[in-house]
Image (cartoon, grey):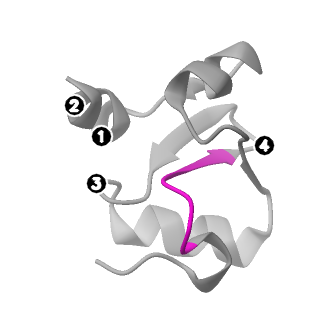
């Protein structure tokens, strides 16, 4: 699966509506497409799950599985 153009250099993207972070390499494509269409996304710097957690985001099941 290819990453969205805005996130070609990022692995994780957060959904501001649900405070969930997705791994762009393992998340379902339909979820990422809907998130990009809604425009309610956020990237993290540094691009890590730890930084996402510091901002109050919980990892999606696909992101947790990829991290293990």
| Magenta segment | 8-14
- Which residue appears at 48% of the width and 45% of the height? 22
Q: As displayed, is residue 16 above or below residue 56? A: below
Q: Are marks 2 and 4 in contact (CB under 8 Å)?
A: no
- Which residue appears at 36% of the width and 37% of the height? 63
**Badge 2 local density, few (<14 within 10 Å), some, or many (20+)?**
few
Looking at the picture, tell me which residue is in the foreground, 21 or 9: 9
Q: CA distance from mark 2 to mark 3?
A: 9 Å
Report the quarter where the N terminus lies: bottom left
Q: CA distance from mark 1 to mark 2?
A: 5 Å
Q: Nearer the viewer, mark 3 or mark 4?
A: 3
User: Circle 2 sits in a helix, a strand or a loop, which is it?
Assistant: helix
Q: Are marks 4 and 1 in contact (CB under 8 Å)?
A: no
Which of the two labelled residues, at mark 3 and mark 1, occupies the earlier sequence position? 3
Q: Nearer the viewer, mark 2 or mark 4?
A: 2
User: Circle 3 sits in a helix, a strand or a loop, which is it?
Assistant: loop
Q: Say which residue label 1 marks.
A: 62
Looking at the picture, tell me which residue is in the foreground, 15 or 8: 8
Which of the two labelled residues, at mark 2 and mark 3, occupies the earlier sequence position? 3
Does residue 41 appear to the left or right of 63 in the view shown? right
């Amino acid at each position: 699966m290819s990453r969205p153009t805005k996130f070609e250099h990022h692995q994780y993207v957060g959904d501001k509506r649900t405070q969930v972070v997705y791994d762009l390499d393992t998340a379902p494509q339909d979820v990422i497409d809907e998130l990009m269409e809604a425009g309610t996304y956020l990237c993290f710097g540094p691009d890590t799950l730890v930084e996402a957690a510091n901002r109050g985001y919980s990892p999606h099941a696909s992101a947790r599985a990829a991290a293990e």
